Image (tube, grey):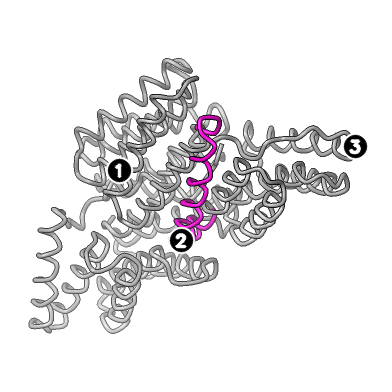
Amino acid sequence: MNHSAARAIALALFVLLSGRLGFADGGGQSASAPSVASDGWRQWWTRGFELEDKFGRYAEAIAAYRKALELAQQGGEARPIANCLERLAMTLLLTNSLTEAQALFEREVAIVESLADPAHLGQALANLARCLWLRQDYSGAEALGRRALAMERQCRPQQERRLVGSLNLLAQVYYSQGRYAQAEATAREELALRRSMTGKDELGLAANLLMLGSISLISGRLTEAEEWNQQALTLLEQHFGAGHPAMARGWCALGLVYAAQQQYGKAEQLLRRAAERWSATYGPEHPDTLAATIALGGVYYNETRLDEAENILRPALARCERVLGGRNAQTAIAITNLAAVEQAKKRYDVAASLYRRALEMEETDSRTETLSTARILNNLARTYCADGRLEEAEPLYQRSVNIIERILGPGNPDLAVVLSNYSMLLRKGHRKQEARRLEARVHNLQTDLKMNLSEQRIDWHALQKQTKSRNR
């Protein structure tokens, strides 16, 4: 799978590995609520949380949260309403219902602004910022994240847990934009704060270490990435024990480092262990199980074990569609992974159909063209090019380049990959002079970024993200 395809997978597994380990406090503060309706909302809220957290039954959890919100609104008290809005919106993020989630978070912010509670407002702003980040509205996410961070700094030391959550959010925003130096500086500030906090949050610290491991991996510092992930695993084992499901996040992260080091045997062992642990705990259709399974399929793909990759990815896609829906971000990841396998098998029509489906999902769900749009365009263009459909491929490469340059600027790994692919199209079309100009540009980028643009291997640092976000 090529570099750009893998970076499309990325947004997702990274957040999976980090978001549920306690990056931030659980959200708005629950207020006592004397009315009968308010007591009712608590029961439905608790039911929804159990359905979501223990069983991954998101549709049922959402229905419970909607009932909790209805009862809280009958009670008329601001804090319970804000709490229910927050929890419902958080769960909607997991099902990729980003538009509705954003509207709910905006309502939460409006309510909390009337409470004169800077700490709660800071959390509400961070919630909305996280939603904008998932929608790839990075400028909006950064602005709100900075505002949340400033409010939480004012509330120190009482709000240190939320402060580290906002630091983490900003680090993710920077990471998603390719601003890795800023992401690392912010994550290191978070690490220093976590280590100085009274009342250690070991889970949050483990999540922070996993993020630093991801940043080291994307920067090519594989030994350092391995060390960060080993530290995270040690913390998780001390807190939970060696066989606890939470250990699987560390196994996944370390497995991806081994994959980047082309130690595929070790990578396969850890990713399979994670998938089996999550499957035994939550079931084979839980989103965590599916994410680890998709990553394992990537290992098989990289080893050119294409039949095994397909045998894993095709049922994983079917499960994603059944459990998460046809328009979920994780479903899109499974689609693009399977498309890469189909392309490697030279079943170009099937691969192109899958990529077109992923592109249609992205264009429907996003307000503007995003980096995910650019990456899918690149992969579809490569498929057309491999099938000799050069005239159809070229405008896709051009669109991809324009999107990346608009969002990330002229010097980043995604751009180098697309330009490299585009230059190969030009050579196939006997346009050697144009190809040489692009190749010179790629060489300069490759030198600046110290990249390896091999098209034969998954860019494993890209697998460190996952478009499921939890802020708890």
Q: Is residue 80 magenta?
A: no
> Regarding mark 1 in the picture, which secondary structure is present there?
helix
- Whichever of callouts 3 and 2 sits on the residue coming sooner in the sequence is 3
- Residue 154 lies, in percent from the top left, at 52, 40
Q: Residue at x 47, y 20 (%)?
A: 198
Name the residue carrying label 3.
Answer: 35
> Regarding mark 3 in the picture, which secondary structure is present there?
loop
- Say few, some or many: other residues with alpha carbon within 10 Å of mark 1 (under 14 / 14 to 19 / 20 or more): many
| Quarter that holds the C terminus | top right
Q: Label 3, label 2: how many angstroms apart (C-alpha)?
A: 40 Å
- Residue 235 lies, in percent from the top left, at 39, 20
Q: Residue at x 41, y 28 (%)?
A: 194
> Regarding mark 2 in the picture, which secondary structure is present there?
loop
Rendering quarter of residue 419: bottom left
| Quarter that holds the N terminus | bottom left
- Say few, some or many: other residues with alpha carbon within 10 Å of mark 3 (under 14 / 14 to 19 / 20 or more): few
Q: Label 1, label 3: how many angstroms apart (C-alpha)?
A: 47 Å
Name the residue carrying label 1.
Answer: 184
| Label 3 vs label 2, nearer the camera | 3
Looking at numbered disc 3 in the image, what kind of residue is underneath it?
Ser
* Towards the viewer: 206 or 250: 206
- Residue 14 lies, in percent from the top left, at 40, 44
The numbered disc on residue 136 is 2
Q: Which residues are magenta?
A: 131-160
- Residue 398 lies, in percent from the top left, at 29, 78
Q: Is residue 139 magenta?
A: yes
- Whichever of callouts 1 and 3 sits on the residue coming sooner in the sequence is 3
- Whichever of callouts 1 and 2 sits on the residue coming sooner in the sequence is 2
In the visual, does 8 lie left or right of 132? Answer: left
Decide whether the magenta segment is chiefly helix, strand or loop: helix
